[in-house]
C-alpha cells in the first residue's frame, strides 16, 4: 500500500486496488487489519518510516552528515524522476489529505516525522559541532518535503536542486564552526 499512497494518496486508492495489489481476499484484509483502510494506512505509514529510518541509519553513522544528506536527496530525486513525478513522499501525500478526524493516521504521521528528525539530529549531535541539532533537523525535513512537493508539481527536480544548493553549504558551515554555546564574541 505504501507505493499506492505515494502515487495516489490515501483517498485516491481504493480497497479493491489495495487487495488486488496484495493479491489478498477482502476477508484477509479485515482479518489482519480489523480497522480497515485506516489501520492498513497506519501500518503502511509505519513501514515507510521504518524503511526510511533504515536508510538514514545506513547513510548517517560515521559519515559526513552533509554528504549523507546529499545522497538521500539524490536518491529522492532519482525516485521522483523515475516515477514520472508521480511518486512523492508517502508521509506528505497522506498528510495533505488527512483531516482532523483521521486521528490514528495523523498520529502515525507525526511519529514518523519525529523519527526522521530524531535520526538527523543524532547525526548532527554526533558531529559535536551543532548546538541546535533538533532545530536543524526540523529545517532539513521541512526543506526536503517542500522541495519534493514543488518538484512533483513542476515535473522537474530543479526545485530540489535549488534547495540542495542553498542548504548544503549552510549545513557545512554549521558543521565546521563551534557550537553556538561555545561561540566567542
Image: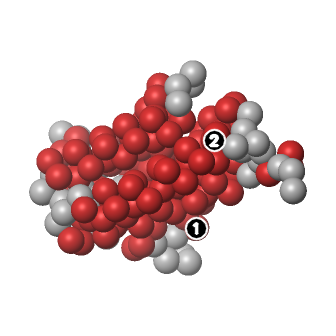
Q: Earlier in the sequence, mark 1 or mark 2?
A: 1
Q: Is residue 136 visible?
A: yes
The residue labelled by disc 2 is 175
Task: Identify the disc placed on residue 33.
Answer: none
Marker disc for residue 103 = 1
Mark 1 or 2, closer to the camera: 2
Residue drawn where x is 17% and y is 52% of the image: 81
Q: Image quadrant for the C terminus?
A: bottom right
Q: Which percent across, then down, holds residue 18?
A: 24, 52
> Residue 176 falls in which quadrant of the image?
top right
- How packed mark 1 is, by other alpha carbons closer than 10 Å (few <14, some 14-19, many 20 or more), is few
Residue at 45%, 35% (x, y): give it. 67
Residue situated in front as seen by the camera: 166 or 115: 166
10 Å crowding of disc 2: few (<14), some (14-19), many (20+): many
Q: Are marks 1 and 2 in contact (CB under 8 Å)?
A: no
157 up-or-down from 31: above or below: below
* Element assignment for label 2: helix
Q: Farthest residue toward the bottom?
A: 100
**Between 121 and 44, the one nearer to me in the picture:** 121
Q: Residue at x 24, y 72 (%)?
A: 153
Question: 78 and 15: which one is in front?
Answer: 78
Most extreme residue toward the top, as rendered? 62
Residue 155 on image: x %, y %? 17, 66
Residue 166 vs residue 137, the one in the foreground: 166
Give percent across and percent down for residue 72: 39, 41
Its colouring scheme is secondary structure
Q: Residue sitting at 45 percent across and 41 percent down?
A: 69
Q: Residue 9: in sight, yes or no? A: no
Residue 165 in percent (x, y) is at: 39, 55
Q: Secondary structure at mark 1?
A: helix
Disc 1 and disc 2: Cα gap in Å? 38 Å
Up the image or down, 39 lies above or below 92; here it is: above
Amino acid at each position: 500500500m505504501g507505493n499506492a499512497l505515494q502515487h495516489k494518496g490515501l483517498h485516491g486508492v481504493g480497497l479493491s486496488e489495495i487487495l488486488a495489489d496484495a493479491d489478498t481476499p477482502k476477508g484477509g484484509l479485515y482479518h489482519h487489519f480489523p480497522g480497515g483502510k485506516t489501520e492498513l494506512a497506519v501500518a503502511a505509514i509505519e513501514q515507510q518510516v521504518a524503511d526510511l529510518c533504515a536508510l538514514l541509519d545506513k547513510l548517517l553513522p560515521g559519515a559526513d552528515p552533509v554528504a549523507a544528506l546529499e545522497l538521500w536527496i539524490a536518491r529522492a530525486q532519482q525516485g521522483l524522476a523515475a516515477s514520472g513525478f508521480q511518486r512523492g513522499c508517502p508521509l506528505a501525500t497522506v498528510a495533505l489529505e488527512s483531516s482532523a478526524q483521521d486521528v490514528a493516521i495523523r498520529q502515525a504521521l507525526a511519529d514518523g516525522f519525529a523519527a526522521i528528525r530524531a535520526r538527523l539530529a543524532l547525526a548532527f549531535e554526533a558531529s559535536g559541532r551543532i548546538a541546535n541539532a533538533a532545530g536543524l533537523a526540523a529545517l532539513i525535513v521541512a526543506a526536503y518535503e517542500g522541495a519534493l512537493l514543488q518538484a512533483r508539481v513542476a515535473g522537474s527536480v530543479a526545485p530540489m536542486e535549488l534547495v540542495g544548493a542553498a542548504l548544503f553549504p549552510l549545513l557545512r558551515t554549521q558543521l565546521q564552526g563551534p557550537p553556538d554555546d561555545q561561540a566567542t564574541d
